[in-house]
Each structure stands twice: as C-alpha cells, then as structure tokens.
Amino acid sequence: MRLGFLSTYPPTQCGLATFTRSLATAVDAQPRTSAVVVRSVETPERLELERVVGELVAGDRLSQRRAAELLNGCDVAVIQHEYGIYGGEDGSEVLTVIRALRVPAIVVLHTVLAAPTPGQREVLEAILAAAKAVVTMTFAARDRLLANYRVPAQKVVVIPHGAPAGPKDVAPVPGRVLTWGLLGPGKGLEWGVAAMAHLTDLVPAPQYLVAGEIHPKVLARDGDAYRQQLRRQAEQLGVSDMVTFDSSYRPTEELTRLIATAQVVLLPYDSTEQVTSGVLIEAVAVGRPVVATRFPHAVELLTDGVGITVPHKDPVAIAAALRQVLADPDTERRAVATAKRVGANLLWPAVARRYLQLADQLLAPGRRVAGDSAVES
C-alpha cells in the first residue's frame, strides 16, 4: 500500500510538518507499505527531500492540479488540515486538490474550532463532504466536530497523535520542570514563571527549563520580545536562578532524551480550544508526569493519575500541582507508571498501523468507517 500525504513538511517549522514526517517514517517502516509527500509551501522551494515528490504552492493553480495527480498515483491520500497551511481564504485552495482526487481521502484534523467564522465553517464542511474518512486525535475533538459541523458520524475515526519512545538510559533530574516547543504568546509561560515564586522553599529548588525557539511567524513579527518579557518577569519575581531558557534546536531523538530528564512536564497553555497537543502526547509517551491547564486534550488524557490539570492563568494552582509531584515520591511514582502504560498505545508504530488499517478499510468494498474504528458493514 502506498499512502500519499499532503502537508507542510520539514524543513518547515511547524507541528504539522513534524507530525507528517514522523507518521510517514512509521508507515515506511511497516511491511509492504510506503509513503510519499506533497509538501505545502507558500512560495516554490523545490528542495530535494526524502519522500517529497512535489509541492503545493499557495496561489498556484498548476501546482494544485499537479498535487492531485501525484496523490492519485497512491492508493490513499492523507490530507493534513489546519487553516494556516494552505493558500486562499481560510485555506480554501486545498479544496481544488481534494475534489480532483480519484483515490480515497483521509482528512486529519489538527484543529476543530468550536466557534469558526462563516468562511472557516464553509471550507471545513466542504472538506468533510469530500473526504472518505475524517480523523480526529481525541474524543473531545470528535465530539466537538459532530456537535458543530455537518459530517456523518460514521466518517469520523479517533486515532491519537503519535510520539517516539523514550530512552531507557536517561534518568529524570530532581526538581527539573520542563516546557518545550515553539514559543510565543498564548503558551502561558508567564504563569509557569510566576508559579516558581511559590516554590522557593522546596529542596532541591525547582529548575524551570523552557526549551525551544521562537515560532517563526512570531519571530518575524515581534523578534525575541516574548522571551525577553519572561526573563524580566523572572528577575522581578526574584526567581532568575530557577528559570532557564534554551533556544537550541533539537532533532527528535535528542528532544526525547531531554523530555526524559524532566521530573515533571508543565503545559501552562492559555488556550481553552486545544483539542490536540503533540507536546502532551510526547510527554506521556516518554513516561513523564504532566501538569497542564484544562485544555480539552489535557482533560481527556490526564486521567487515572497520568497527570494533574489546573485552571488557566492560575500560578498558585500550577505551583500546588507541581509541588504535589515534586515533593511526593508516591504521587510521582504512580504518575510515571500510569503514563508508561497509557503511552504504549501512543507510539508512532502503533499509530501508523491504525492509519494503514483505516486505509485498508476504505479500499475494501462493502466496508464503512464508524466511531473510533473501521468495521465491516
């Protein structure tokens, strides 16, 4: 079986690009399967990249037709959807590609807005109508999709975001609190910094490590202003010695090793809309306890002791949850054991097999998709 992916792709820096590379790599590793990628770009780049067979260039009608032709050379097309990665108003240019497909299309939704604009709703509902199957990565996203958009429930499948396995030779650093990813306003890091001021009595003193580069779009607009704001905040609160920023770029294996060094992962995000978080999945897959604000994916995943959810923009609550993990070995031990059990189903090979099973179902006559699995009709 050959899967054709339409998405951003490295060296583009975004979560969808990383997701697609990881999933395509895991598909390639399965027996008798392969993956190719049509890379969505804003301007022509024509880079020679592994798996990339063509480009979908924003505003270029010829590239839209060519993208459809390339995907039609596969057994199944897998379309990653996020409003910002395709050309046209609300990413509408992807519709030209999808409507030209002669092979089944699986659309993977990375964002499901509860209150879309009329244009966003129109584009997404047209995509949903053209797709043979629609993947959400959480049940919260599935429920929101079915409640707010016109789409048959039998089209919608829940397949979790994947993650790499954690290293077995790395131990957590006592007191290390870790947040990572592309940084910018909305990540809520100011609440994490403020929480450190409520933990100065702990021994050893917690060390909050913020790892990651400024998001390219934020960097182009505001430069390094967000990180400098956080540095000033730490100085004003007297916790500069407890907060460290590391802007190094880390490939997947190196990043996974960094995650394994955390005693606890902190996700203090401002968003109440986030139904999918790759960072959250990566933390659980590596077996680390998580403290997160109550965005939908965290509420769904951090059950049974995997982690602790707290109110948004509440540094006192964040500090109390961090204290519970950092200062109580039993709480930490239970969280680690539960995260490792849950995380086994989130590893990329398991996720790739779910996509291949779904593709196989779409190609088999007399079958349909229902709920969170493919079943025979």
Image (spheres, helix red, strand yellow):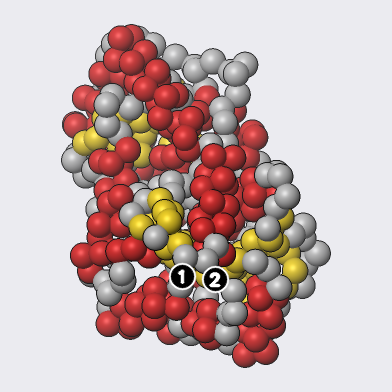
Image quarter (top left, top right, bottom left or bottom right) of the N terminus: bottom right
In three-dimensional space, the C-alpha distance between marks 2 and 1, rounded to whole angstroms, equals: 6 Å
Residue 198 position (above or below residue 119): above
Residue at 56% of width from left, 27% of height from top? 166
Residue in front for this viewpoint, 311 or 122:
122
Q: Residue at x 25, y 60 (%)?
A: 144
Q: Are marks 2 and 1 in contact (CB under 8 Å)?
A: yes
Horizontal relation, residue 273 to residue 241: left or right = left
Which quarter shows the C terminus?
bottom left
- The amino acid pointed to by label 1 is Lys
Q: Is residue 186 left or right of residue 9?
A: left
Residue 275: percent from left, percent from top: 33, 53
Say which residue appears at 34% left-offset and 63% top-offset: 154
Residue highlighted by disc 2: 104
Residue 72 seen in render: yes
> Can see residue 231?
no
Label ID, residue 132: 1
State the image coordinates of residue 62 (x, y, percent, origin top left): 67, 89
